[in-house]
Amino acid sequence: ETGVTQSPTHLIKTRGQQVTLRCSSQSGHNTVSWYQQALGQGPQFIFQYYREEENGRGNFPPRFSGLQFPNYSSELNVNALELDDSALYLCASSPTGEGYGYTFGSGTRLTVV
Amino acid sequence: QKEVEQDPGPLSVPEGAIVSLNCTYSNSAFQYFMWYRQYSRKGPELLMYTYSSGNKEDGRFTAQVDKSSKYISLFIRDSQPSDSATYLCATDTGRRALTFGSGTRLQVQP
């Protein structure tokens, strides 16, 4: 299987709710990162997982959490949604973890109302 | 001040023009420099990357990095309507978290 697949494509949630976004990476891609891209902005690093352990985190509060599974899938969970969480959430995976080696998915568009 | 600054555009050019896209950065620890292209409703796609200073050419695309002035450039020769997209510069300290510019929206008019 090639490429990075994200689901769902679009999602609408109410403020205060919780959401889980999913990502399926290429076989052999042990490193997965999640990014948040607000409208008109570049992606911002949320966190990175390597072999199911978080090994790097950006400037995001603890209500953003993640999981990585042995089958190269991963999840981003966001609790207590706020209106400012409305954004495109991107998953990126890499076989090496080097910055130039990442393949991005098409993202999940989350709207919080 | 953002770590990576990029003019948001939009930049509109006629087909066949040479396009110059630029970024500046503030963190001298950045080692890898990348350019991504992002079409509407899609994720970023890596176009080119360079390590440290210098030039790199790939077909119609040339990336330049000047670490002394902390300046990153992407040149597109013979621009095509299919090049219309948002172009994102990105850097990496070597610790794998990418820092992106805000993106420049490019429109190539047929």
Image (cartoon, coloured by chain):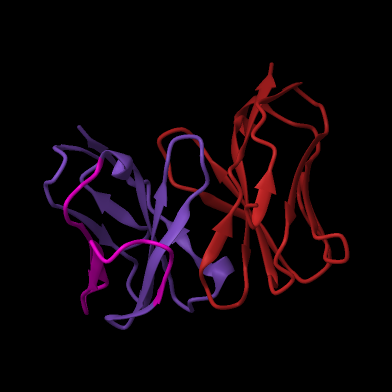
Residue at the spot x=67%, y=29% of the render? B9
Q: Is residue B96 visible?
A: yes
Q: Residue at x 31, y 83 (%)?
A: A51
Furthest residue in direction front, as rendered: B1
**Above or below: residue A4 compared with residue B81:** below
Chain A shown in which color? Answer: purple
Which residues lie in the magenta part? A56-82
Say whether residue A29 is visible.
no
B22 up-or-down from A93: above or below: above
Residue A96 x/y as whole percent? 48, 79
Looking at this rendering, what residue extends furthest in the top direction? B110
What is the letter of the red chain? Answer: B
Seen from the viewer's position, the closer of residues B94 and B80 is B94
- Looking at this view, is B27 or A8 the one in front? B27
Q: Quadrant of the C terminus of chain A?
A: top left
Q: Residue at x 69, y 29 (%)?
A: B80
Which of the 4 quarters of the picture holds residue B49? bottom right
